Image (cartoon, rainbow, N blue to C red):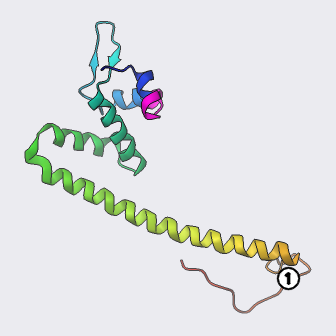
Amino acid sequence: MAYTIIEVERKTGVASRTIRFWLDKGLFPYVEKDENGIRYFSENDLQWVLWVDCYRQIGMSIEQIKAYIALCAMGEKTAAARREIILEQKQKVLKDMENLKNVLEKLDFKLDYYDKMIKKSKDELNPLSKDYVKRSKRVKIKA
């Protein structure tokens, strides 16, 4: 089965404008064109769209993805190099997740503070508030 860019957008959720941009950057070297220049995506191409979208979401550059695609085109002999690229990306995602976990903890701390402020009707941390309490020690959050 062959799909147009609009059909690929519907099936993958990736905007057709984004797919066209990626096509222009050479990220789908095997997508076929008909005599009118209309591109048609195969089932395998749909999977590539989803993978490219995943790689972009984790911060891989266009050039990194192109290098990965070039390795894929060389076949089985590049499997170890491709695995290393994916492992590096996984490690980056795990680090990003840890950073986001820390951010989430900070946001939860702040939300808890505001819940208490609303309940007590006092803004004890605002120096312009009549309820301000000067503290020599502040509650510290992890940096």
First to last magenta residue range: 10-18
Please give the name of the residue rendered at 79% of the width and 77% of the height, measured from the top-left corner: 116
**Residue identifier under label 1:** 132
Q: Residue 122: tell me if it is visible.
A: no
Is residue 76 positioned above or below 3 on the image? below
Instruction: Measuring from the top left, give residue 5's x and y in whole percent.
Output: 41, 22
The number of callouts visible is 1
Please give the name of the residue rendered at 43% of the width and 23% of the height, measured from the top-left corner: 7
The residue furthest left is 77
Amino acid identity at mark 1: Tyr
Question: Is residue 15 found left or right of 48 in the rendered image?
Answer: right
Please give the name of the residue rendered at 20% of the width and 54% of the height, measured from the top-left corner: 83
Instruction: Measuring from the top left, give residue 20's x and y in whole percent.
Output: 40, 26
Q: Quadrant of residue 111?
A: bottom right
Residue 83 lies within the magenta run: no
The residue furthest right is 130
Instruction: Measuring from the top left, give residue 141's x and y in whole percent.
Output: 60, 80
Residue 12 lies within the magenta run: yes
Q: Quadrant of residue 131?
A: bottom right
